[in-house]
Amino acid sequence: LAMLVVVGAAAVYLAWRGYVLGEEKRTIEQGLRMTQFAVDNAKDSCIWLDDRARIVYANQAACDSHGYTRDEMLALRIFDIDVDYAEAVFHQEKDTLARERKRSFETRHRTKDGRIFPVEVSLTYFEYGGRFYSIGFDRDISARKRDEEVLRQSEERFRNLAQLLRAVAEALACGLPAVAFDCASGPGEIIRHEVDGLLVPPADEKALARSLARLMADEGLRRAMAERAPEISERYGPE
């Protein structure tokens, strides 16, 4: 009887243990499926490379942004889509990535139809089965680059305007009448029309030429404006 009890208890334990292991396995599998689903449907592109720079995984965002099907993406190497990443550089940086584990940089990618767009890449290194792999999350930064270019051009225009205004102010201070376009912000804030200079409508080159000719031909006008021009020092000089 005691033997039967022991055998029965062992059978119950094994059954319970099998149930627990089964639940743990199902939980792990569910977690893996959720992780796979999240990466597959992530907003940013996700591309995995092996030690030969072959694309071994690409999520849907990566396929869509580059214009390839998933099968087409998996037939490519990173050099087929990254126009700035040479093969020699990849092999050099592979050791660096293996040592540092993570790396971020900007580069340019090329789509299937030849369009090139800027991306910000975040790479993570890992090993599986003794082999090198890297996971790259790529974000299209075209909008950010456009904003940066707009800001750069705006700053350049401001610098040019500042230089122009300084030149106009220096000319007036020396008693030289000025002729300029009446821009929304610029010469019109310094030149007083018909007092120490002449203003013409923006981009009206013919009006500019006429005003220059008028000033050169009228000595009395030049003298009158030249007398008032130095007042710029009083108007904008230190108090």
Image (cartoon, rainbow, N blue to C red):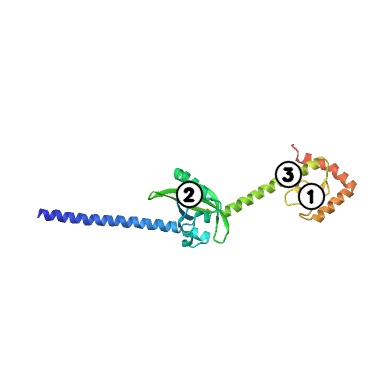
Residue 233 position in % (x across, y down): 78, 39
Q: Residue at x 52, y 56 (%)?
A: 80
Q: Residue at x 77, y 42 (%)?
A: 169
The dot on residue 163 is: 3
Nearer to me, 27 or 232: 27
Dot 1, how many residues are within 10 Å of its Cα: few (below 14), some (14-19), or many (20+)?
Answer: many
Dot 3, how many residues are within 10 Å of its Cα: few (below 14), some (14-19), or many (20+)?
Answer: few
Q: Which residue is mark 1?
A: 180
Q: Nearer the viewer, mark 3 or mark 2?
A: 2
Is the C-beta separation of discs 3 and 1 under 8 Å? no
Q: CA gap, disc 3 to disc 2?
A: 44 Å
Q: CA gap, disc 2 to disc 1?
A: 54 Å
The dot on residue 229 is: none
Residue 208 position in % (x across, y down): 81, 53
Is the C-beta separation of discs 2 and 1 under 8 Å? no
Quick one: SS at disc 3? helix
Q: Earlier in the sequence, mark 3 or mark 1?
A: 3
Q: Which residue is mark 2?
A: 123
| Amino acid identity at mark 2 | Leu
Q: Nearer the viewer, mark 2 or mark 1?
A: 2
Q: In the image, is 192 to the left or to the right of 43? A: right
The N terminus lies in quadrant: bottom left
